[in-house]
Image (tube, rainbow, N blue to C red):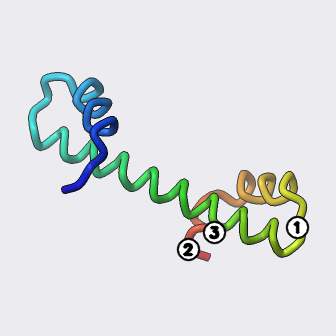
Amino acid sequence: MGFPEEMVLKAMKDNGDNGADSLIVLLLTYKFFLHEMSQIEEKVDYLVKMGFPEDEVNVAVTRCGCIYFCFG
């Protein structure tokens, strides 16, 4: 599935002896989270390039949450 080795090792440690299905779910959760964070960073960079102060953009992201900034 192309997961980075570091992510797999962390998932294995966090998963313990819960089995392969649980490990896959955990890896997919990590992958989704990293993708979500990447989208937020891209939106913040875009708004900063438009001239908005970075601290104000970060406050907006914190107040409005990821859903608005990732999918809005």
- Inter-mark Cα distance, 3 to 1: 17 Å
Q: Is residue 56 left or right of residue 60?
A: right
**Around disc 1, counting alpha carbons within 10 Å, would you say few (fewer than 14), some (14 to 19), or many (20 or more)?**
few
Q: Residue at x 23, y 54 (%)?
A: 2
SS type, badge 2 = helix
58 in relation to 71, above or below = above
Q: Residue at x 26, y 24 (%)?
A: 13
SS type, badge 1 = loop
Q: Residue at x 74, y 54 (%)?
A: 63
Q: Check disc 2 and report the residue beneath it.
A: 71
Q: Check disc 3 and report the residue beneath it.
A: 68
Q: Amino acid at mark 3?
A: Tyr
Q: Position of residue 54 (x, y in %)?
A: 84, 56
Mark 3 vs 1, N-terminal side = 1
- Asked if marks 3 and 2 touch (Cβ < 8 Å), the reply is yes
Q: Check disc 1 and report the residue beneath it.
A: 52
Q: Position of residue 24 (x, y in %)?
A: 19, 46
59 in relation to 14, above or below = below
52 in relation to 25, above or below = below
Mark 1 vs 2, N-terminal side = 1
Residue 28 shows which numbered tag? none
